[in-house]
Amino acid sequence: MSNIAVHRVDKPGVLPDESKLGFGKIFADHMFVMDYETGKGWHNPRIEPYAQFPLYPAAMVYHYGQAIFEGMKAFRTVDNRIVVFRPKDYLNRFNRSAEILCIPKIDVDLVHEGLNKLIEIDKHWVPGSLGTALYIRPFIIATDAYVGVKSSDTYKLFIITSPVGAYYAAGFNPVKIKVEDKYVRAVPGGIGEAKTPGNYAASLRAGVEAKKEGFDQVLWLDGIERRYIEEVGTMNIFFKIRGELITPALNGSILAGITRRTVLEIAKELGIPAVERRISIDEVFAAHAKGELEEVFGSGTAAVISPVGQLTWKGQTIVVNDNKTGEISQKLFEYVTGLQYGKIADKHGWVAEVTKL
Ligand SMILES: *Cc1c(COP(=O)(O)O)cnc(C)c1O
């Protein structure tokens, strides 16, 4: 066990009405913080009241974007336990992003311990109605006050948490997707595999244009041939063609989603054929033309499974499964959320208990 100092708020806040949470605007009382300095390593892990914190305007993160983040969730189960879904997998990916952005790696066990302590202290901030969760946002920023380009010598790690409302409060609503053929998100040899702000900055323009054209999200194609499917804005993507699930292989330019991995592992367990391979947009449109494109869905921590109702590529639109949620999409959604809310026994070791209520 390590020494994590705890400085609590004087007066704990109150979780608002669970039906009015929305996403990412309300924050729990405390945050986990840790500092890094070259020569000293990561040090001073602590829990503090959630509050503003000062940085010099010259702080490197503001200028060159040396930063990484994660996004995972804590749930209140039906038997009143507080659990986090696959925390170590997310923290290990955090370290993979650190490597790519030249940020010093964290001790996963220590940060996991800090996370558990934080969630335990703020356990009354974990909403309990179906679909709600406490969203957990760990991040690291470069803090040297220096405007030259280099990798920073000082960093701060934070974990903040935010109670979030049900993503599908009004039921599944299959999304309209624009297959992006003008802009690209990432290229081989770049930083597409990292969860880093720069990738999001690079995606905004395409997202804004797609919204204006009436789409919900952008589907990215590979940066060289603009042919092979990569992923959606904040989700990985799956196609069900002739009974088989296909998702693009991890090629270094797409994010290795934990939900993606969960879907692949569950598919295997349920005997649903599933492969990771290169798949082109031509293949998807050709499968649709032959009546073989059965389902399309995105996978990600926020929505778990997000059914895709239509895809538009170079002005041509295809409707998937009559714009309805597919059978496998539904089944996977129910399985994953069943595990998260403790309705299905966890035989995978994915559901990490933090505390009982
Ligand atoms: C986080 C993220 C995903 C989904 O990953 P999960 O671990 O399933 O939440 C997919 N694509 C991008 C670009 C992401 O940042």
Image (cartoon, rainbow, N blue to C red):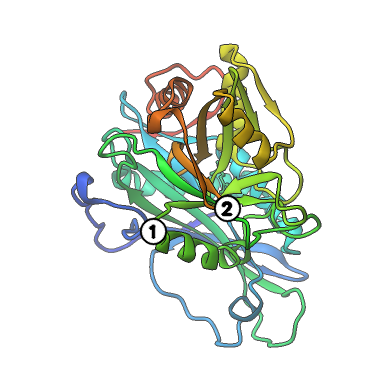
Check disc 2: other Cα within 10 Å, few if <14, some if 14-19, many if 20+.
Answer: few
Quick one: which residue is furthest to the top in this view? 271
Q: Which of 47 and 289 is in front in this view?
A: 289
Residue placed most toward the observer, 171 or 20: 171
Say which amino acid is labelled 1.
His
Q: Which residue is drawn at 62% across and 66% down?
A: 198
* Residue 257 rendering spot, x and y as whole percentages: 60, 41
Label 1 and label 2: CA atoms lie apart by 47 Å
Q: Is residue 108 visible?
A: no
Under circle 2, the secondary element is loop
Q: Residues within 10 Å of mark 1 (few under 14, many from 20)?
A: many
Task: Identify the residue under disc 2.
Answer: 314
Q: Nearer the viewer, residue 243 or 315?
A: 315
Q: Looking at the rendering, in which quadrant would you find the N terminus? A: top right
Q: Please, what secondary structure does the residue beneath circle 1 have?
A: strand
In percent of width and height, residue 31 lies at 44, 59
Picture layout, residue 64 above or below residue 147:
above
Asked if residue 352 is positioned above or below residue 36 in the image, the reply reads above
Q: Earlier in the sequence, mark 1 or mark 2?
A: 1
Occupied quadrant, residue 57:
bottom right
- Residue under numbered circle 1: 30
Q: In which quarter of the image is the C terminus?
A: top left
Q: Where is residue 293 in the image (x, y as percent from the top left)?
A: 55, 27
